[in-house]
Amino acid sequence: MNIEQLFQSIKEKKSFLCVGLDTDINKIPPHLKHRDDPVFDFNKAIVNATAPYTIAYKPNLAFYESLGASGLISLEKTIKFIRNNFPGLFVIADAKRGDIGNTSALYARAFFDKMDFDAVTVAPYMGKDSVAPFLGFDDKYVILLALTSNPGAGDFQYHSDGTDKLYEKVLKTSLQWADKDSMMYVVGATRAKMLADIRKIIPEHFLLVPGVGAQGGSLEEVAKYGMNKQCGLIVNSSRGIIYAGNDEDFANAAKEKACEMQQAMKKLLISAGLVSA
Amino acid sequence: MNIEQLFQSIKEKKSFLCVGLDTDINKIPPHLKHRDDPVFDFNKAIVNATAPYTIAYKPNLAFYESLGASGLISLEKTIKFIRNNFPGLFVIADAKRGDIGNTSALYARAFFDKMDFDAVTVAPYMGKDSVAPFLGFDDKYVILLALTSNPGAGDFQYHSDGTDKLYEKVLKTSLQWADKDSMMYVVGATRAKMLADIRKIIPEHFLLVPGVGAQGGSLEEVAKYGMNKQCGLIVNSSRGIIYAGNDEDFANAAKEKACEMQQAMKKLLISAGLVSA
């Protein structure tokens, strides 16, 4: 999917919502737990219920890997289900990988070729040769960690040489590796006001924004400081949507939450003049 | 395994060698490729041949994940094989994970509880809450990326606030999170001379040292600048050992390379007065 298609999808759905499929076997509704593949059945129901309101899904690999081989099978089935039933959705592997070149290349082939993801989150600590192998795929994206939404973000990401904090250095340096057609960035909603400065460095790139909802970030502030001419935002919500309900009606509860967020996003897109009312 | 037991193992084997099980299905000897589980069969042969000379094994997860569910099965079988046949070896998941707290906790349980690794490599970018969930396991270890051996290491790890480069900041900050009984660090052999300064910050911790061999680092320099009273070094070699041969005699070729490295390590341990001749 190229950036123009992604923006088209945002305009059609009047949404820039990504649903995080952080499917925890211990948190899914009890009536699903004795199915053959409870994780996949849960994901299928969530996707069916929320797809009209979302432009993207983001499974976090940890939730699947922690189940061993069976978790990877559930993940592969989930991606196939999305591809077969809802073409045009953007599917992100939240993997936060990053290793020496030949090893990153293996991860890249696994996520892009084997598992058919559109994008993968990558950690910048090891520098260019750890990121570059993810960049050689048409219409696929590295989403590089820049400024994350968690409490520990401040431990190293603000480390400053007097000119640039580490996350600014990551933005500026990685701009030399790829443009917006193959790179996006993670910027947490809990640092929304810093988006204005970040937009000075990367005005055109898409941002994946976690931390709205459970972690306390404000959607309105994210849009105010982060939106650009192509929207430029993919706002993720995981727990707030997928665990909105915990009984047989869980998919409906997720649908209502997703619809609520989509309605708020629609208003923001209209205000910005990107879609008509 | 506690640190005392690890040091005991080093003294008994007169070795601080770790063999990296970066098993690439495209690089293993042709005669294995049509087996039911060529990756496991390769690993089993390598472990059987090299175990007398090593104290540790380090599968890099990328090589297994890139094969999907079947790769994870090969990995789990490999760990069980090591545990059942060579108790007392230290087994490291080279995973370079790091995510928000509740997600890191899932990875920690996957690697320590489910897969029975002794240690896991962790990326520091997201700070304390991304690392802490790996610390709550008795006799298990976080091996935190500090100064890596790849070319891109210089892109961000040297970012300095005038007092500390980023990797020094990582060392100093993480010292407040855990001591040598639950934390180790990755320091690449290609930066061996910097080990002297690193040892001023972390005199007692074990270091996992990649980059000897294929990446050009010198074992003698690593020992000269990095060895401490409990050896404090786990030096990894992957490709140089496991792909030493590529025919039916591949295990023997790996054995010879491992033995060669062990002999060099024995000399260095004797010189340091840690074992007797």
Image (spheres, coloured by chain):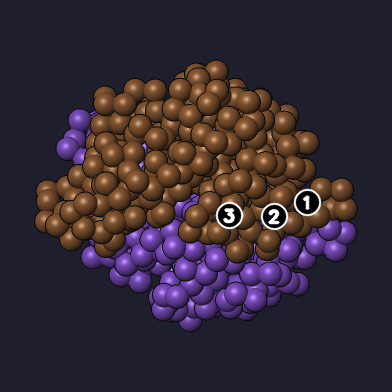
Chain colours: A brown, B purple
Residue B277 in percent (x, y) is at 54, 74
Residue B85 in percent (x, y) is at 25, 64
Point 40% across, 67% down: residue: B118
Residue B104 in percent (x, y) is at 46, 60
N-terminal of the two: label 1 or label 3? 1
Residue beneath disc 3: A217
Front position in the image: B237 or B125? B125
Question: In 3D space, how far apart are the residues under numbered discs 2 and 3 (Cα atoms)?
Answer: 18 Å
Residue beneath disc 2: A157
Q: Secondary structure at mark 2?
A: loop
Q: Quadrant of residue B266?
A: bottom right
Q: Is residue A15 above or below residue B268?
A: above
**Label 1: chain letter:** A
Q: Secondary structure at mark 1?
A: loop
Q: Nearer the viewer, mark 1 or mark 3?
A: 3
Q: Are marks 1 and 3 in contact (CB under 8 Å)?
A: no
A198 relative to A91 in the view: left or right: right
Which three-letter amino acid code belongs to the residue tagged 2?
Answer: Gln
Most extreme residue toward the front is: A277
Same chain, labels 1 and 2: yes
Q: Are marks 2 and 3 in contact (CB under 8 Å)?
A: no
**Label 2: chain letter:** A
Q: Secondary structure at mark 3?
A: loop
Same chain, labels 1 and 3: yes
N-terminal of the two: label 2 or label 3? 2
Disc 3 crowd, CA 10 A, few/some/many (<14, 14-19, 20+):
some
Q: Nearer the viewer, mark 2 or mark 3?
A: 3
Disc 2 crowd, CA 10 A, few/some/many (<14, 14-19, 20+):
many
Which three-letter amino acid code belongs to the residue tagged 3?
Answer: Gly
A27 relative to B211 in the view: left or right: left
